[in-house]
Image (tube, rainbow, N blue to C red):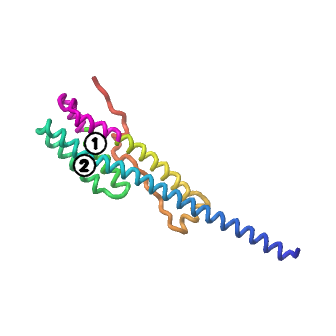
Amino acid sequence: MAPSLIALIVFLVVLVILIMWFVGAYNGLVRLRNRVKEGWAQIDVQLKRRHDLIPNLVETVKGYVGHEKSTLEAVIQARTAAVSASGVGQQAQAESALGGSLGRLMLLVEQYPDLKANQNFLALQEELTSTENKIGFSRQFYNEQVMLYNTRCQSIPSNVIAGMFNFQQAEFFELVDKAQRDAPQVKF
């Protein structure tokens, strides 16, 4: 074989390997970006479920604690803000505020034994607890996918492809209220 033919074959093999790597790296970034979107969609589904439960919970509580209007209004305002929030950061901030107002509502409920024994309230409270757990798992999945995606976007050599095709960093769903990170204090 002629040296030029060998050089051409080597060049073509290297070119095919580079093209295969390029396609694989691009497809890997697309796959991770779609998993981030899927993770966010799962959070969104659970937040919608949470938002749908809150009016029923407030109406049930309202029948027992009508004079505690400010707490009930705070929950409704926080829910409204959470429903209208857009983007990961704004959603995280709104959900943090909503979680705080729901916590105050549950503290209020502790003062009313008849309400705590009400079957509708108990069912709604169980649904809300289940939804909160699902939101937590969905946040965890989402943040794991964001970490994988962002790492791939920042790592050499896939960062070259990420830059060429404008793959943007994804935002983590983080607690805004630092007080929510502390363990609750239980006193008897």
Is disc 1 in contact with disc 2, using a CB cutoff of under 8 Å? yes
Task: Check if residue 129 falls in the magenta segment.
Answer: yes
Q: Earlier in the sequence, mark 1 or mark 2?
A: 2
Say few, some or many: other residues with alpha carbon within 10 Å of mark 2 (under 14 / 14 to 19 / 20 or more): many
> Viewer-proximal residue, 163 or 47?
47
Location of residue 162 (image quadrant): bottom right
Res 153 → quadrant? bottom right
Q: Amino acid at mark 1?
A: Gly
Mark 1 crowdedness (10 Å alpha carbons): few <14, some 14-19, many ≥20: some
Q: Amino acid at mark 2?
A: Ala
Name of the residue lying farthest toward the top: 188
Q: Could you tell whether 46 is left or right of 116 in the image?
A: right
- Front-most of 122 and 139? 122
For the residues marked 1 and 2, what is the alpha-carbon distance in whole angstroms? 9 Å
The secondary element bearing badge 2 is classed as helix
Which quarter of the rendered picture does the C terminus lie within? top left
Q: Disc 1 marks which residue?
A: 100
Circle count? 2
Name the residue beneath numbered marker 2: 78
Position of residue 59 measured from the top left corner of the image (x, y, whole percent) = 18, 43
The residue shown at (21%, 34%) is 109
**Bounds of the magenta segment:** 104-130
Residue 10 located left or right of residue 26:
right
Q: Residue 106: x, y in percent? A: 24, 36
**Residue at (41, 51) in percent of width and height:** 42
What residue is drawn where x is 33% and y is 45%?
Answer: 177
Q: State the quadrant of the N terminus.
A: bottom right
